Image: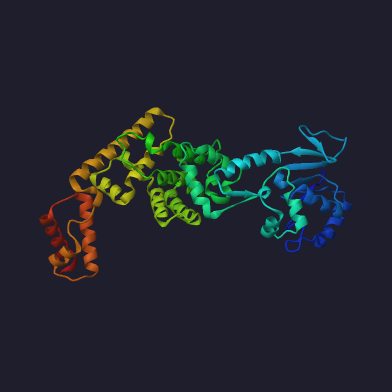
Amino acid sequence: MGIIIFTDLDGSLLNHDDYSYVEALPALTRIKAAGIPLIITTSKTRREVTPLRQEIGITAPFIVENGGGVFFPRSDDFDISGSYEKDGYVVMELGMSYEKIRAAFRNINERFPARGLGDMSLMEITDRTGLSLAGAVAAKDREFTEPFVLDTDQESDELDKLVTLAHPSAGLWFAIDTGLAEHFLPELPAMRLEQDPVHRHKDVLTHTLAVLENIRPPAEQPADRPPFDFRRTRLAALFHDVGKPRTRGYQKGRGVTFHHHDAVGARMTRKRLEALRYSNDDVTAITELVALHLRFHTYSMGWTDSAVRRYVRDAGPYLRELNVLTRGDCTTRNEAKARQLAARMDDLEARIDELATREELAAIRPELNGGQVMEQLGVGPGPVVGAALAYLLEIRLEEGLLGEQAVRERLDDWWRTNHRG
């Protein structure tokens, strides 16, 4: 069996600090003496690689621009389907031409603050990379790929513009397929989990983008739907399952599992939104929505009024957004199941409205305030007041409004049981 050696350049064949190959010369001599082909595979351009190959004396094929193209010395010994000749080489193009890449990149620029190497002057390239002027010229002579940088100060604005489009999934798929998403939202392509015939599950990325599409702009919402923050809800939809890749497991009899992906995803969401420089209010709201997006899943088991109150209390000011996100998180193709899930959500919202009418549900709090607790128990400020208020809030959640007299009696009972000999 023949031997072929593939090598990267920076930090491999070349010293990482000064890009010298002196330390590799003994190995290069042995490889050449043994007649072993040494194939360079690198992110560099052909113009950057050619002088090095000539200097070292390498004649084997070489791979440039992260696999964008493979260059073979011209030969009559073999034929490569789909190849073409260029400057004395037979070229196998594995991606697309630089002209097509640049055309696609101009489309990216309409949505993202990205600057490609082709947009930069030679002086800017040398400043950003540390290359010499000649090195910058060689790096800019590209045939298959386009390195780029993002303006981080504008990333959140550009992401907002994208997710609030009527149909954002096309732009997001483009950002994923071109590698752009790796630079500003790496959690997104990470959700493209491989499926296999044994551990079957929904493709998380496809599901996520379907949820995003399900959350329609306010103008397309039913007339009786309360107003909600469309931008934040769309962002919450984008992030709601980011915790799944980190929590993916397999349980016999249940298949693929994502235990606690809501909590893990909320932490990941907070970290990414802060890196994208979203406001504190946005970070808090979107993170809370991600953390709560699974709460409705147990509704089919039967919620008491207490459970409904807790749902409202935990959602707080984001209740409307959470309800819209929950509706959007149904991507089943089973029409009967979809109707059933929608009916359950309708039922929950009706119960919330009914309880709100009876109990001022939007502001769930104990029926006595701190001053009234101190007056009733004859105590001053301190931890016991907080404990008493927590007890009264639990009563409020479990039993609803009881009236001031009944609550004072319950407080006295609690005090006698827990704080008096």
Q: Is residue 190 toward the left or the right of residue 50 in the image? A: left
Q: Is residue 3 toward the left or the right of residue 327 in the image? A: right
> Is there any visible trace of residue 251 in the rendered image?
no
Q: Which residue lies furthest to the top in this view?
A: 335
- Location of residue 194 by image quarter: top right
Measured from the top left, where is residue 409 in percent x and y?
A: 11, 59
Q: Residue furthest left?
A: 405
Residue located 31% across and 40% down the image? 226
Residue located 34% across and 48% down the image? 318
* Position of 213 relative to 117 (above/below): above
Q: Is residue 193 toward the left or the right of residue 48 in the image? A: left
Instruction: In this rendered view, identify the residue nearer to me: 53 or 398.
Output: 53
Instruction: In this rendered view, identify the residue nearer to me: 251 or 207.
Output: 207
Measured from the top left, where is residue 74 in percent x and y?
A: 86, 39
* Position of 103 relative to 260 (above/below): above
Instruction: In this rendered view, identify the residue nearer to me: 139 or 323.
Output: 139
> Is there any visible trace of residue 64 in the rendered image?
yes
Q: Where the N terminus falls, by quadrant?
A: top right
Q: Is residue 100 toward the left or the right of residue 39 in the image? A: left
Q: Where the C terminus falls, by quadrant?
A: bottom left
Measured from the top left, where is residue 398 in percent x and y?
A: 22, 50
Residue located 87% across and 56% down the image? 29
Say how the picture is coloured.
rainbow
Residue located 27% across and 42% down the image? 303
* Position of 128 relative to 382 (above/below): above
Measured from the top left, where is residue 294 in percent x and y?
A: 38, 45
